[in-house]
Image (spheres, helix red, strand yellow):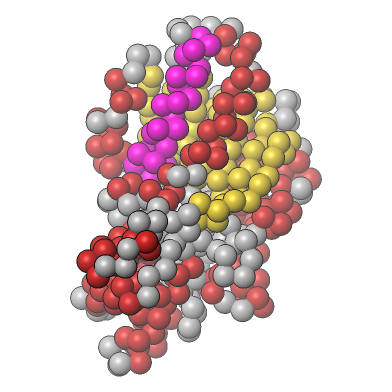
Amino acid sequence: MPGTDPSDPAPRGYTPSMTSDYSRISATARAVDRFVEPRVATYIESIRETVAGMPPGRPFVIADYGAADGANSSRLFKGIVEQLRAINPALAVRLVYVDIAGPAPFRRFWEGSALADAENVGAEYIQCSFYEPLPDLAGRVNLALSSTALHWFDTRAVDPSFFRHPQCIQPNQMPEGERALFAARWKDDWRRFLIERSHDLADGGLLVLANLSDLGGSRWPASAGYDRLRDACAALHREGRLSKEELEAIFVPDYFATPDEMRAVIETDEVRRRFSLRSIEATTVPCAYCSQVFEDDEVRERRMLAASLARVVRAWSESSVRVGLSACPDLVDEVYVRLEDAFFEHPEALPYQYCLIELQRTDGAS
């Protein structure tokens, strides 16, 4: 997911960063692999002859956009490398990880990764936004993936004041009329992502996306986490510990689009010239932290569950909360203590709703 680049001219608080232990509390996000794996395997089988005939000096390039530290895609990448090597044992593989965060967490992950010990497998970390052009990858990527990342706005494209609201901390909480402004912003960002990434892909290359998605009603990803976080901040405001201006500035700059919104972008002429749509499907991944605890309502287990859920929410929201609390940073921990207490009093799962999309690069597209 996006992180923080100290050289970014925009205010750093509006470039959302994940906590350093994100990959250790993202079990629900990693569970989407079981839906992605068969799609990738089918694609690789369909290009078997191409893989078998690749010359020794040309690597098969796999890119992960919004990679965080790289850990979340490691098992998926390992399986892909094994399938490729079963077809062409001498094939070189290049793994490219793209994220706006600094490279240190990736380096720690890679040093202990089984992929690092695999023969003729190289890795590269590119520190930039996945909305930006990547000229070094132009026409070279055979397989590209992104999971749990494309709901983030390109915060550099708008003034930070865009991300403010008197009551809500995230666009999906807003009434439809207010949400429309953010939906339009997301549409432009996502169209730009698809166009830029089409330049990276080789002819016939595949882009596989697991996009967190709004499936209607309250069925949008981790809504219980966002709503309880909003309520914790609102309570601090009512108690006079948080000003109106600070409350308005607490905002997580992401948007969960519906499958129909995603399809509408895919079907625009400029995207259709570049990609053919292989599949689009909505699915739900159950919360990884709730299955055992909901069967046994012991106080200790409820507290452990509440702590896990609050930690998950903190991983992707803390940098945004700190923007609103920049004048009173001591309140940050208080927000998440209240969040944990809310989950303890009323345990509620954080399932992830996805729209799974396969887009294949059209041969010769401009």
Residue ranking furthest to the front: 296
Residue in view at x 57 percent, y 32 percent: 38
Q: Is residue 43 visible?
A: yes
19 or 160, which lies in front? Answer: 19
185 or 42, which lies in front? Answer: 42
Left or right side of 165 for 179: right
Residue 211 lies, in percent from the top left, at 56, 50
Q: Which residues are magenta?
A: 66-88
In the image, residue 124 lies in the stretch drawn in magenta: no
Residue in view at x 27 percent, y 50 percent: 21
Residue in view at x 24 percent, y 70 percent: 299
Secondary structure predominantly adopted by residues drawn in magenta: helix
Left or right side of 5 for 332: left
In the image, residue 78 lies in the stretch drawn in magenta: yes
Q: Is residue 329 above or below residue 126?
A: below
Q: Quadrant of residue 310?
A: bottom left
Q: Quadrant of residue 8?
A: bottom left
Q: Is residue 135 above or below residue 88?
A: below
Q: Quadrant of residue 104?
A: top left
Q: Is residue 95 above or below residue 330?
A: above
Residue 90 lies, in percent from the top left, at 45, 7
Total numbered badges shown on the rendered structure: 0
- Considering the image in quadrants, where does the C terminus appear? top right
344 or 192, which lies in front? Answer: 344
Q: Is residue 306 visible?
A: no
Residue 94 lies, in percent from the top left, at 44, 23
47 or 122, which lies in front? Answer: 47
Left or right side of 119 for 40: right
Residue 327 lies, in percent from the top left, at 27, 78
Residue in view at x 65 percent, y 76 percent: 176
